[in-house]
Amino acid sequence: MSRLSLVNIRQGTKSVPRFSQGNTLPLVQRPFGMTAFAPQTERNGSWYYHPDSHSIEGIRLTHQPSPWISDYGTFLMTPQNDIVANSAGGAWGGHRPADDVMTPSTVKIRFLRSICDFEITPTERGAVGRLHFDTDRPSVLSLLPVMGDYTYTFVPEKNEVIGTTTGHSGDIAENFKMFFVLRFPEGAVDFAKSKIGADGSEKGFCHLALTGRDTEFSLGTSYLSADYAEAVIDREIAGRRFDEVLAENDAIWEERLGRIDAEFDDPKTERTFYTCLWRTFLYPHKCYELTADGKPVHYAPYDGSCREGVRYTDNGFWDTYRTVYPLFVKIARDEFAEMLEGFVNDYRECGWLPRWISIGEVGCMPSTLIDAVIATAVVNGIGSRKTWEDALDGMLNHANHNGPLPRFGRNGAESYVKFGYVPRNEHGESVNLTLDAAYGDWCIATVAKALGRDELVPEYERRAKNYKNLFDPETGFMRGRDTDGKMADDFDPVKWGGEYTEASAWQSTFAVPHDIEGLCALYGGEDKLLEKLDALFALPPVYRVHGYGGEIHEMTEMAAVDLGQFAVSNQPSFHLPFIYAYLGLPEKAAYWAHKAALEHFSDEADGFPGDEDNGTTAAWFIFVCLGEYPLCPGKIENVKFPGLAKSWKINV
């Protein structure tokens, strides 16, 4: 059976900034590949693809991990003739969305304005492209600007164009530049008639004059140099034609999708399962290259240097620790080990473990949930002892010291150490900062135990109980305290923001995955905690904008799914049904998990109930199908409940 044929890469793409049904892109790339490609249909910032759009601006080289983070190292490839434009806004034309071919291995678009079929199939750091024009009009392949500054150099003796772009957004990336090389067959480009220029915003364009109706080209990219980009073409493509590389991609994806052999009674659920499984293999992206003798090297964004070793990027650990890395324990252990080494390399190079990384540190979400990723790896024996030791050093650093900028480390770390909580009058989102810090301290104790650092264990086990400092027995919620220990006079559990991160007190109070027994004790026993959980699911999905000053899309999406205060549309709610399973009610866990999965997930363009962040929402669906869930990443055992799959096995 071809599982590849079950995958719809448009899943979750029918999104707009105010309502997410995934906020995804139809990405064509290798598993964890450095370079990806997607059609660009819109001039709408990071929301540049919509599946219903009949316009097409080109196929975009992209690294975008989320529309909220934006892209970097990107440009647009557009076939043109007739009137040739210098920007996407002038070059756009029509296409028929139903005729587009999109698989994990290739994207093929019929550009109606230029009467051209244009398709791309990727390698890890490059691609092979193919164009066919049904016209004798003089045609060009245009490289059009997206963000940043561009340069181009023609090298006719090599049949190449060498380009650079500096574009990146919202992160720290010293002297960032992506180099790219397009290599054509001899005589396929008339360099004398080709044109380099700039539009009104000084973002360069390049029009490559093609000499025939049909041509293929090879593309290589690098964050280090043009020589490295050329080496990508020589090593990863090695003179092969489009169809050979496409067949290799199909085989690679079939192997990845075959790592879980799952059977379903419902074909729709089967399609959704394998489409979600595909998404879990997209992120994080490889961000390292190979020397001539095969040694890994990478661009270091903190000082702009070239460093030895591997690096991975495009990941927000606040999201992905919950489901993605626990799933990798089952289906991608070797890849997980290399990812962990890359994350720890960031600490070795800049002194801080990554928090939310694009090409450099963005730090857009709070806390240091990479603690849970590290603990998950250590307890499952993934990675080397040296990597674990260095990771623990990084964990101890951000657990006790404020970062040089708010995007580094735990926000409010030193106040947390002083008070046993993050004061609400010093930091926003103080409740979640405190709860995440307590869980992170439990992760530190877990890693310290595994490494024989027994002197650390009592202190961090004690700190792991700090969540208790915020429990309000009168209301039964976690609430912020100021530096005098006082809670706010006005309290409404459906107010979002303020002391809470993308949530209200209802979604945040249960964020104690490492100590459910202790949480039960605060409520007066398991029965009382179950009553509180029942109330969460029974309440209507009402909310107040409060700390955000206006509605954020996560509020809209919680109301849309209509599962009470269980906002399956966003990560803080992911674990809520599975507390039932932990407390001995697996059927009740299954009821809510199945209801959410079957009513609000599909393989279609509206296939998610909210943001699909770097595989984390897709992996949630996978676990619901398997009938187990990582309630506390960093513990080996998952909670069990009846799953949607009638049978499954891991093939790794």
Image (cartoon, grey):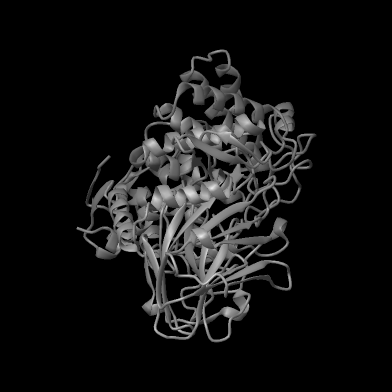
Q: Quadrant of the N terminus?
A: bottom left
Q: Quadrant of the C terminus?
A: top left
Q: Quadrant of residue 88?
A: bottom right
Which residue appears farthest toward the front when viewing the image? Answer: 157
Residue 164, given in percent of the width and then of the height, sits at 62, 57
Q: Is residue 522 visible?
A: no
Horizontally, residue 219 falls left or right of residue 410, namely left
Vertical position of residue 228 compared to residue 388: above or below: below
Residue 589, given in percent of the width and then of the height, sits at 37, 48
Q: Quadrant of residue 470?
A: top right
Foreground pick, 490 / 159: 159
Foreground pick, 383 / 396: 383
Q: What residue do we see at 68% from left, 27% from top?
A: 400
Residue 473, given in percent of the width and then of the height, sits at 62, 39
Q: Is residue 120 visible?
A: yes
Q: Quadrant of residue 541?
A: bottom right
Q: What residue do we see at 52% from left, 36% from top?
A: 342
Residue 42, given in percent of the width and then of the height, sits at 56, 74
Q: What residue do we see at 60% from left, 28% from top?
A: 395
